Image: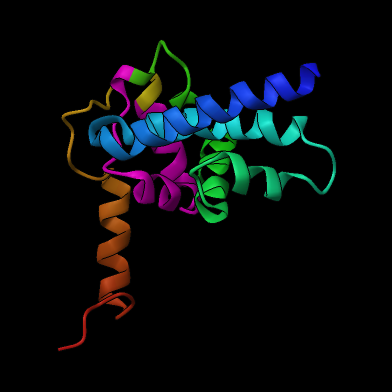
């Protein structure tokens, strides 16, 4: 019975964080990471093979989005750290997911900026190394638009 109560309360928290992620664009990534943390907790509380059905029945989050949120929570725990979250800015959830797939050099640059308090919610530009990477890839014809 206790497991059902826990899963019910986790579903409420997941849905609240999901709604917040959708409605609070300035801190969408932070809310998404919190949602991911609760999704990880709920997944761990489910019996083997019950996770996807539980997610479908109890949460407004679809499977693909849940996977993104959980990945954020696992790979960017600094987004959940209440001492750091007010200084973290990423332009959106997709940008945060892209950062997770970026080369280690770019990920480390971001993590160092967060640790040093150099990122802010008002910051709108990408890290310098991401800009350099885009220039390099465009020079090679990768990602360049066709006219």
Q: Quadrant for residue 31, please give it.
A: top left
The residue under the point 70% across, 49% down is 53
The residue under the point 47% across, 33% down is 15
Q: Is residue 130 inside the magenta stretch?
A: no
43 or 8: which is nearer to us?
8
Give the magenta part as a residue range.
86-113
The residue under the point 78% across, 16% down is 2
Residue 125, position as x, y percentages in the image: 19, 43
Q: Reply above or below: 6 against 146.
A: above
- In the displayed structure, does residue 13 sit left or right of residue 136? right
Residue 105, position as x, y percentages in the image: 46, 45
Quadrant where the image shows the C terminus: bottom left
Q: Quadrant for residue 117, please give it.
A: top left
32 or 138: which is nearer to us?
32
Residue 52, position as x, y percentages in the image: 69, 50
One can see residue 126 in this view: yes
Q: Quadrant for residue 120, please give it.
A: top left
**Farthest right residue in view:** 48
37 or 127: which is nearer to us?
37
138 or 98: which is nearer to us?
98
């Amino acid at each position: 019975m206790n497991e059902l109560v826990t899963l019910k309360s986790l579903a409420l928290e997941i849905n609240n964080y999901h709604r917040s992620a959708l409605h609070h664009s300035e801190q969408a990534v932070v809310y998404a990471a919190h949602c991911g943390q609760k999704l990880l907790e709920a997944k761990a509380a489910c019996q083997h093979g019950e996770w996807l059905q539980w997610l479908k029945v109890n949460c407004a989050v679809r499977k693909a989005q849940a996977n993104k949120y959980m990945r954020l929570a696992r790979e960017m725990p600094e987004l959940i750290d209440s001492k750091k979250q007010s200084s973290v800015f990423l332009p959106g959830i997709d940008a945060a997911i892209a950062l997770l797939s970026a080369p280690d050099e770019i990920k480390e640059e971001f993590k160092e900026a967060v640790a040093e308090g150099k990122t802010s919610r008002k910051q709108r530009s990408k890290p310098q190394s991401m800009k350099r990477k885009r220039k390099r890839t465009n020079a090679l014809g990768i990602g360049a638009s066709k006219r």
